[in-house]
Image (cartoon, grey):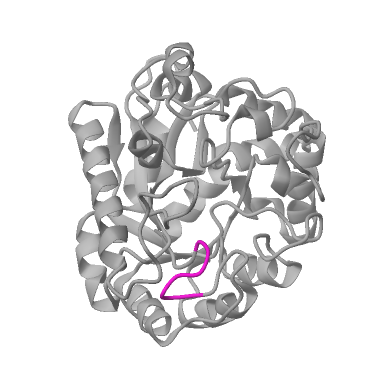
Amino acid sequence: MTGDVMFDAHLDLAWGAQLGRDLTLNLDDLREQDPVTGQTACVTFSELRRAGVAACFGTLFACPASEDYPQGYDQTDRAGWKGARRQAVSQLDQYRRWQDAGLIRLLDSGEELAAHVRAWNPEAPGPLGVTLLLEGADPLESASDLDFWRSAGVRLIGPAWGHTRYAGGTDAPGPLTGRGEELLIAMREGGMVLDASHLDDASFEGAVALQPNVIASHSNSRTLVAGNRHLSDEMAAAITERGGVVGLVALSTFIRRGWQDGDSRATFAEWARHARHYGETFGWEHVGLGTDLDGGFGLEKAPAGMEVYGDVRRLEGALPEEAWEGVRVSNWVKWAEANL
């Protein structure tokens, strides 16, 4: 790799823009006028360049309606997918506008991604490379809709977030639905990668049986933090045995068992325990970054000592020296070149 570059497998960039964040600002200016209250931002394009992030998986995330986000789509409505689709298409258009402005470069294949990262020069950084990941499959009307999203540049799909029409998910136990089974088969046949993050155990089992080209873009270890949002060792084994990589999430709730708002922030050493568990159990070549900054949380819930995105690099000091280069960039790039 050229220089000390990084790759992040989960950044909700367009979701931030949909909330009103202007990621073209420098970080201090964004923080001064941030429309999102209670979540101090860590991510802007200039901050990612400063940190050495050459590329990422950038999400299209359609948010269900909630008390915090009443404008989200209605999951109880049979036609609710149309609202989910509007959100995802709006975010797709945002990525395209950023590309037109020279801020990002949309990457449609693993070969393009690897070439972009290897050519990226931290001393004269170019646009951020972005490969699109659909987080939650509700924007698809059905499996027959997959061609639209593939032609739009989506290369990875996570069928669940919470419950979707396709799968049980975080805090919403359940298997793949019939619609979900059709989607996973279509993904396999169409060369679309399965992102297992957010899948419930029951839906995970069915999903990897139907589409074995699988990763977890942002999932810490259930061995250290309970709950179906995290990967059990059986799930992590299923991913890594198929050659996949698991991304580490920088959220205190997902790092320290029992963490609650108001507690001291988790430490980088605690975050590194998840990396070490994965690396020592399944092989360091299967561990990468999937920080999820700023995906619904800010500085207040990130590890202590993280003040800007670039502080992700503090993780290096808590990992084996020989593991860091793979975790920060090359494990994801090698996987993408072979599988995306």
Relative height, residue 49 to residue 249 (above, below): above
- Camera-side residue of 11 and 282: 11
Where does the image place residue 275, in percent across and percent down from the top left? Answer: 73, 47
Which residue occupies 72% across, 22% down? 305
Is 13 positioned to the left or the right of 39 in the image?
left
Whether 163 is among the magenta residues is: yes
Where does the image place residue 311, in percent across and percent down from the top left? Answer: 63, 23
Where does the image place residue 215, in percent across and percent down from the top left? Answer: 53, 61
- Camera-side residue of 38 and 295: 38
Is residue 52 visible to the viewer in this orientation of the structure? yes
Is residue 302 visible to the viewer in this orientation of the structure? no
Whether 223 is among the magenta residues is: no
Which residue occupies 67% across, 70% down? 235
Q: Main secondary structure of the magenta part?
A: loop
Which residue occupies 59% across, 37% down? 328
| Residue at the extreme bottom | 178
Which residue occupies 44% across, 22% down? 34
Is 102 positioned to the left or the right of 184 in the image?
left
Magenta segment boundaries in residue numbering: 161-167
